[in-house]
Image (tube, rainbow, N blue to C red):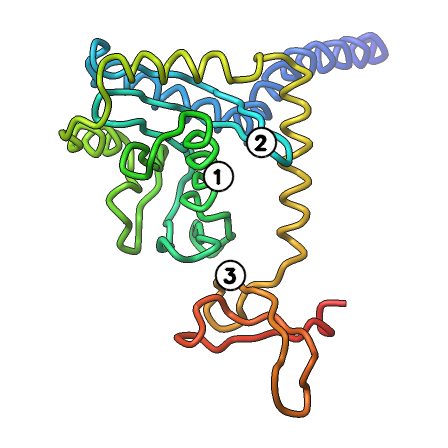
Amino acid sequence: MDYTQLLHALQNNIQNEIWYLIPLLIVAAVIKSPWFKGRAGEAVVNLSAKLSLDKTRYHLIKNVTLPTEDGTTQIDHIIVSQYGVFVVETKNMKGWIFGNAKQRYWTQKIFKYSQKFQNPLHQNYKHVKTLQNLLDLGDEQVFSVVVFVGDSTFKTPMPKNVTHGGGYVRYIKAQTEQRLSDAEVQKVIETIESGRLAATFRNHRKHVAHVKEIAAKKISEPLCPKCQGEMVKRTVKRGENIGKELFGCKAFPKCRGMVGTSLLQ
């Protein structure tokens, strides 16, 4: 038996098998990426809105990027109706979710692994305010809605506008008071379409860079060592440390956590 030929044949077969695996590995990597999870979550919400909301009364506008004073902000979904304008933020996550409306960061826990992520209500707040300024609408006309999709479970009580799966549709349908006339609804749709940035690669790249810049700034700001909530910079007004700066918990006096600025340098 010619073992050399046999070895070459095995090597060729292995190489052929590897080439078949490469596309599968690429597909697997894309599916696990945050970008794909985000797009998949948005697709679920889009489909749910189209199937569950009457198109003659609810108008869905997707992936809206609006200019702001310091850059841009990107809104997953805007649903316009005579019952108000609903600004929908989507989170495609799994595991247990812990948080409340006031906390700066929420927690995702998967078995023994846990990580913090920005409170989606805070994240959506900028979207809402940007849209209000564009449309000249009041707080009673624009609603912030957060919807989690995927295999996630809330382990703490959530506000009514933080929902899971199709719960956001029920929340929207629960708003039955007329807040906009038919003419105002049409004007809102036209204003959003004319005010949004074009869906180009250049605009997307600028928005991604802006988001990364904001994230970098947030990392440098401390969390309360007691409640893990948001902190604000304050100046000591009395005592031996008068004049010095420190970070105090935003929930003061309920929480008295603090961090000296010297500890952050």
Residue at 36% across, 18% down = 188
Does dot 3 land on a helix, a strand or a loop?
Answer: loop
Q: Position of residue 110 (x, y in %)?
A: 43, 49
Q: CA distance from mark 2 to mark 1?
A: 10 Å
Q: 17 left or right of 258?
A: right
Q: Position of residue 15 (x, y in %)?
A: 74, 13
Say which quarter of the image contains residue 190.
Answer: top left
Q: Nearer the viewer, residue 229 or 35?
A: 229
Q: CA distance from mark 1 to mark 3?
A: 17 Å
Return the residue at label 3. 230
Q: Nearer the viewer, mark 1 or mark 3?
A: 1
What's the mark number on residue 68?
Answer: 2
Does dot 2 land on a helix, a strand or a loop?
Answer: strand
Does dot 1 land on a helix, a strand or a loop?
Answer: helix
Q: Amino acid at mark 1?
A: Lys
Q: 65 left or right of 240?
A: left
Q: Amino acid at mark 2?
A: Thr
What's the mark number on residue 59?
Answer: none
- Mark positioned earlier in the residue sequence (1 or 3): 1
Q: 223 left or right of 112?
A: right
Residue at 44% across, 38% down = 124
Q: Nearer the viewer, residue 57 or 165?
A: 57
Q: CA distance from mark 3 to mark 2?
A: 23 Å
Residue at 48% across, 63% down = 229
- Mark positioned earlier in the residue sequence (3 or 2): 2
* Tag 2 near tag 1, CB within 8 Å: yes
- Quadrant of the image containing the N terminus: top right
Q: Amino acid at mark 3?
A: Glu
What's the mark number on residue 126?
Answer: 1
